[in-house]
Amino acid sequence: MDSYIARELKLRYNPVAVIFTDEKPDGALQFEAGRWGCVIAMLTAAAKGRTACFDRQTCGCTGGRVGLGFGEAYSEFPGGIEFFLSTGRGEGYREGEAYKKTPELARAFIDQLPITDIPYTYVVFKPLKELADTEKPELVVFYATPDQLSALVVLANYGRAGSSVIIPFGAACQTVCLYPYDQSKEEMPKAVVGATDISARPYVDPDTLTFTVPFGMFLEMEQNAPESFLTKEAWRKVKERIPNSENA
């Protein structure tokens, strides 16, 4: 699938389609069952042209299973996820990440997550440009620099009355899959800015964040883009300082 937005914003990497399916793509990258890995590393691989997939045994970690929509898995976390996200539980357990001040605050965060168990076997990350006509993704993920992110935020709001972008706290995989999928169920879904998870930042370029939209919202943005601010001088001043890329 061709993207006007990707060309106009001179994206460094391909937008990535997130597909829920019962069929495993041929030749897809996949973690070994039971082995640790970061979902965002696979997202980056897809943005660079590879296809990656996950099932419930190959999510890379407990958080990845939750973040990809494969149900509640935090109850299996040794010592309690609320301690790992905050102060730690002490000797014999993993050091706390200090992302939440107290275990109580961490538990409150976990309890409000839109945890879901999708009725599919695989979650697939695929370069949008390689999407087949018969494939309909759930979500589209962009890697964006500040200038590009600014354009995506404005474009997401172009045809809407209210604010149409959120930037929630959470694991990076939650912000590229779980939260956006939850938004896709809304009558007026919102885009989700993500990859602010400190633990996942080493797997993305230092000057980029993610911007994820439900597929229907992506199509809306694509339709609106040619008549939007992207045709005006204000954007041209910004665009000229964005380096050209192979996706331009």
Image: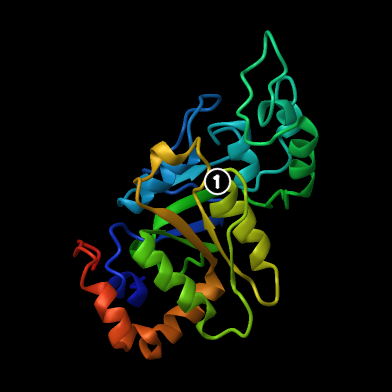
Q: How many marks?
A: 1
Q: Quadrant of the C terminus?
A: bottom left
- Residue 27 percent across, percent down from the top left: 36, 43
- Residue 121 percent across, percent down from the top left: 60, 46
Left or right? Give the position of 48 relative to 104. Answer: left
Left or right? Give the position of 68 relative to 117. Answer: left
| Res 29 visible | no
Q: Residue at x 58, y 39 (%)?
A: 64
Is 234 in front, or is 248? Answer: 234
User: Which quadrant of the figure has residue 59?
Assistant: top right
Is 16 in front, or is 146? Answer: 146
- Residue 145 percent across, percent down from the top left: 35, 59
Tell me if residue 1 comes above or below residue 223 in the rendering.
above
Find disc 1 in the rendering and name its residue.
Answer: 173
User: Which quadrant of the figure has residue 164?
Assistant: bottom right
Identify which amino acid the numbered label 1 is placed on.
Answer: Cys
- Residue 206 percent across, percent down from the top left: 35, 45
- Mark 1 closeness class: few <14, some 14–19, many ≥20 residues within 10 Å: many
Is 230 in front, or is 179? Answer: 230
Q: Residue at x 54, y 49 (%)?
A: 123
